[in-house]
Image (cartoon, helix red, strand yellow):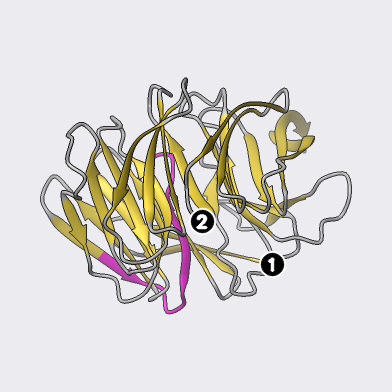
Amino acid sequence: MSGIEVKYKFVQEIDCKQGAVRSVRFSVDGEYCVTCGSDRKIKLWNPYKATTLKVYGGHGDEVMDACASCDSSQIVSCGLDKSLILWDVSTGTPTRRLRGHAGPVTTVRYNEESTMVVSGSRDNTVMCWDVRSKSIDPVQCLNDAKDSISSVRTSDHEILSASFDGKIRRYDIRVGQMYSDYMKDAVTCASFTRDGQCIVVSCANDVVRLIDKDTGELLGKFIGHTAKDLCLESSVNAQDTQILSGSEDGKLWVWDLATQEVVAKLSGYRPSKYPTLSINVHPTKNCFLAANGYSILMWSAESTTKVD
């Protein structure tokens, strides 16, 4: 009987020179990435060549998250200054500043068509902004959470939010319905699997859970990494076969989704004294980016056939 064993190659480490890197995100086509820094700047990169393409400055405090639009013409960013900024990618200039949150804004995403921006804040709210209109007010404020919003994700018809109140909330925009699942511990990240059937949930108690989106049934628990109450991110790989998570020990942990066994603990060429917080997976390939201290790290998968 033969099977496929996936091995990972460390590609490179990029010193972003923008203070502590708060998040790293691939563009929709996977050609570029954006990093957010404690120096109040956003940087656009060609991560494969370790080349800075553009620097965006305009926030009044640390930038916590950013996301590129589906055509890569715009970037939206958010920060501790309680604002969101829309940027023109080519000119590097801000086109609009959105203020509405009463607290620091820690997470932001476009919807699938990049017509709407969804943001989450420490003011316990999720806000939706129509970026086609000239209005600077949110079109909707979702205020069901009882604690800070740690992550937001979107699908073609859903908004998924995670909160430190221990709940993930999924809003079905088509039917105007909200569904929630209680995880018992503070949730630091929640994201859809690639097939949209499940949700990967990171909790502050050193556990990543896989749950069925429709029933809330627990399908798997992934353990071994350490969270130390850090706001760690998790994800699936491009084929929905592995679970990934950042860790306090500075590594990127990888588990087999089916067996829940650890298959890799990825690190750079040298041990890191910083935790791996933000992670992002290439849209189509098993290429991973992770923010670690002042740098981002990149790995790519190499598939080799083995015979049992």
Q: Position of residue 57 (x, y in %)?
A: 52, 40
> What amino acid is at disc 2?
Asp
Toward the right, the furthest residue is: 270
Please check the rendered image and state whether residue 183 is part of the magenta-colored stretch, yes or no: yes
Residue 214 drawn in magenta:
no
The image quarter containing residue 233 is bottom right
Residue 103, visible in the rendered structure: yes
Instruction: Between label 2 and label 1, give the one nearer the viewer.
Output: 2
Snapshot quadrant of residue 195: top left
Depth order, front residue of 152/63: 63
Q: Please name the residue that numbered disc 2 is placed on.
A: 61
Left or right: where does residue 136 sit relative to residue 95? left
Which residue matches tag 1? 224
Per the rendered image, the range of residues in magenta is 180-196
Q: Residue visible at 70% across and 65% down?
A: 248
**Relative to 72, is 181 on the left or the right?**
left
| Residue 1 appears in the picture as rendered | no
Location of residue 23 with respect to 43 vertically, above or below: below
Q: Earlier in the sequence, mark 2 or mark 1?
A: 2
As drawn, the label of residue 101 is none
The one nearer the camera, 162 or 50, is 50
Which quadrant of the rendered structure holds the C terminus? top right
